[in-house]
Amino acid sequence: MRLMESDPAHHWSLTELAAELHLAPGYLVRLFKSSTGLPPMAYLSRHRVELAADRLLHTDQLISRIGEAVGWPDQNYFARRFKSHYGLSATTYRARFTRA
C-alpha cells in the first residue's frame, strides 16, 4: 500500500508491484484483498480518487493538473473515474464542498 501511495502518479501494474515486493502476482492479490478488501489496482484507484478529492478541496490547482498528479493524465478518464466514485463531477464537487 505504501509503495503505491508514495507515488500515485506512477503507472503501476500488478506485475510491477508484485516484482517490487518479491511476490507472485496472484499471491499479492490474495494478501492485499485479505488486508484491504480490495485488489491492489482497485485500492490504487480508490486512493487516487480520494487524493484528488482532497486536493480539490484544499488547493486551487487546476482540475487537469490534479488528475495528472494522481496518475490520470487523460482528463476524460479522470472525469469518469471521479464521477463514478463520488457521483459528482470534479468541478461540482469542488464548488459544492469548498463553500463555507
Image (tube, helix red, strand yellow):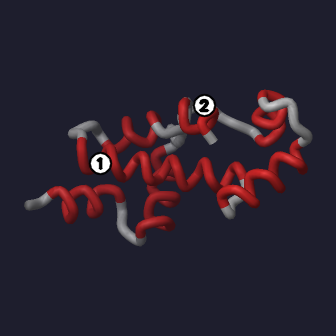
Q: Earlier in the sequence, mark 2 or mark 1?
A: 2
Residue positioned 25% across, 56% down in the render: 94
Q: Nearer the viewer, residue 17 or 36?
A: 36
Quadrant assignment, res 95: bottom left
Secondary element at tag 2: loop
- Per the rendering, the mark at residue 56 is 1
Q: Nearer the viewer, residue 72 or 50?
A: 50
Screen quadrant of the C terminus: bottom left
Residue positioned 78% across, 28% down in the render: 20
Query: x, y (%) of residue 7?
Result: 55, 30
- Amino acid type for the residue under numbered disc 2: His
Query: x, y (%) of residue 54?
Result: 34, 49
In the displayed image of the protein, which residue is found farthest to the front? Answer: 35
- Per the rendering, the mark at residue 66 is none
Query: x, y (%) of residue 96?
Result: 20, 65
- Residue 79 as seen in the image, left or right of residue 91: right
- Residue 81 as seen in the image, left or right of residue 36: left
Secondary element at tag 1: helix
**Residue beneath disc 2:** 10
Q: State whether residue 92 is above or below residue 76.
A: below
Give the Cα separation between the discs numbered 2 and 1. Answer: 20 Å
Quadrant assignment, res 86: bottom left
